[in-house]
Image (cartoon, helix red, strand yellow):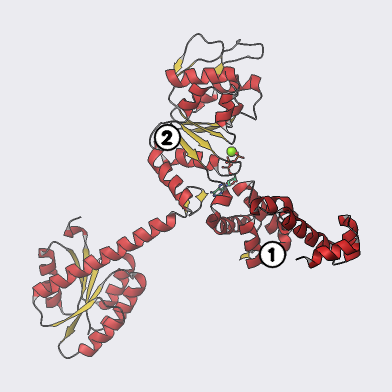
Amino acid sequence: MSERDYKVLVVDDDLEMCGLLSDVLRGEGFSVHTLNDSLEASQWLKKEDFDVIITDLKMKGLKGLDLLEEAKQVAPLTPVIIITAFGTIESAIKAMKMGAYDYITKPFQMDELTIIVKKALENRLLKKEVIRLKKEVESRYHFHRLIGKSPPMQKIYDLIERISDTSSNVLITGESGTGKELVAKAIHYNGVRKEGRFIAVNCAAIPETLLESELFGYKKGAFTDAKADKKGLIFEAHEGTLFLDEITEMPLTLQAKLLRMIEEKEVRPLGDTNSYPIDVRIISTSNRDIESSIKQGRFREDLYYRLKVIDIEMPPLRERKEDIPLLIQHFIKKFSEEMKKNISGISEETLKRLLNYPWPGNVRELENVIQRAITLTRYETILLEDLPITLTVEKEESLIEKGAKERYTIDQLEREYIKRVLLEAGGNKSKAAEILGLDRKTLYRKLQEE
Ligand SMILES: Nc1ncnc2c1ncn2[C@@H]1O[C@H](COP(=O)(O)OP(=O)(O)OP(=O)(O)O)[C@@H](O)[C@H]1O
Ligand SMILES: [Mg+2]
């Protein structure tokens, strides 16, 4: 950027001074706007974004300090330099307190002024940069429609950014509900392929017999029901993205055909003698262990390598708990807007419970829990009672598991078991003895051994 791109506003009711300042600053390459009416200046402030403002302190109409106050409100990042006559230093200091960038006393050397203006400009650019960086950091709390600020999510955002403009195939793995489809869409809509279409095909939902004709299309007469030519979904995704959800469910015969399509970049519809060139990026997903499918001979290894040129593994929610509060806020906002309810948040106790839950269904489960809570709640805050029962009863760890984890001796295990039975019997020793198959005396003895 040259100085010419920076706009300086000079306000002084002394016409001569205005002219002088304007000449000097123009000489330095700034674009200068001079006004000798401070009221008019106040109007200009509202419609133009100046980089530096220089104003005299004593003027008819609006005073320099009033103008400063206005500038602070409408353009808080624009530095204001005050010109003041000798003898009014107090008011200059007052101006500094009100947020002026600097002041200069008349008479002054023009060099002095240009140095201050340049420094002020630097200050403004720095402030703007800080704000921009701050925004950038904040925006990393989400990416496209993905929410999350945890380190593993940040890594995923970086990766999406790096690969969006390439055409490499991507394989996204991860448990159900971790956001695999959202990642696929973020890749598509963040890159050059967004001009093309995002075609989603769920390999598990379409019957085997239909999947082939859906994907590759057919010629009229290719089979009994083929009354007319039909374009396959792969064609629809030309120059865009073909999203193959749950790829491990694809039958082996189709896997071979897909592999051929990837290698030759051509598609041949059913019943057609010709092949047609095609340009698609394939993003596929799996929530199963593909490698074991390969070992079992249910998935082609060569296709696997073609699909996972880039692989993304989605972390389960329980491994990035710091994202939970952010996701909760997001879903509260989403569903309370949708249901036109005024829900502001969640009680601390409820949040704690949600943070401690292992979320086997990941973000989808959390989304459902919040949606349900917002439907049910009668207050402005989500309470424990609005959670489903699976979340409200804290599951006690099985004694055997605990014992195995902490390497109990038989004696320790016995003591722990006795304690638990006694607790469940409400402290009634006769009842506990009965459950334990001991006589009361033995139970007493065992209790005293502790
Ligand atoms: N990071 C996230 N931020 C916001 N919403 C999310 C996030 N991850 C998942 N979701 C939401 O959770 C739900 C499930 O996400 P998605 O369909 O992408 O998961 P998936 O991994 O494809 O699951 P599945 O394996 O069951 O198909 C969607 O409603 C999605 O909007
Ligand atoms: Mg999915």
Residue, x 48% and y 39% (percent of image)? 312
Report the side of 437 relative to 330 (left or right): right
Q: Position of residue 108 (x, y in %)?
A: 10, 80
Most foreground residue, 224 or 145:
145
Please tell me in which quarter of the rendered image ligand 1 is found.
top right
Q: Nearer the viewer, mark 2 or mark 1?
A: 1
User: Which residue appears at 21% of the width and 61% of the height?
Assistant: 6
Left-right relation of 352 to 66 = right
Q: Position of residue 159 (x, y in %)?
A: 42, 42
Q: Quadrant of residue 217?
A: top right
Which residue is identified by label 1?
A: 383
Identify the disc placed on residue 423: none
| Label 2: which secondary element | helix
Label 2 vs label 1: CA separation? Answer: 44 Å
Vertical relation: 5 (above or below) 202: below
Looking at the image, residue 37 lies above or below residue 254: below
Q: Is residue 433 above or below residue 303?
A: below
- Which amino acid lies under the numbered mark 2 shown in the image of this protein? Arg
Q: Quadrant of the C terminus?
A: bottom right
Residue 398 seen from this side: no
Whether residue 437 is visible to the viewer of this picture, yes or no, is yes
- The residue pinned by badge 2 equals 193
Q: Residues within 10 Å of mark 1 (few under 14, many from 20)?
A: some
Q: How many marks?
A: 2
Q: Confirm or reject: label 2 Cβ below 8 Å from ligand 1.
A: no
Residue 41, horizontal then vertical, whole percent: 27, 73
| Residue 52: image location, x then y, percent | 23, 69
- Residue plotted at (41% across, 46% down): 158
Q: Assign a secondary structure to mark 1.
A: loop
| Residue at image coords 35%, 59% | 132
Q: Residue furthest top?
A: 273
Which kind of residue does numbered mark 1 sit on?
Leu
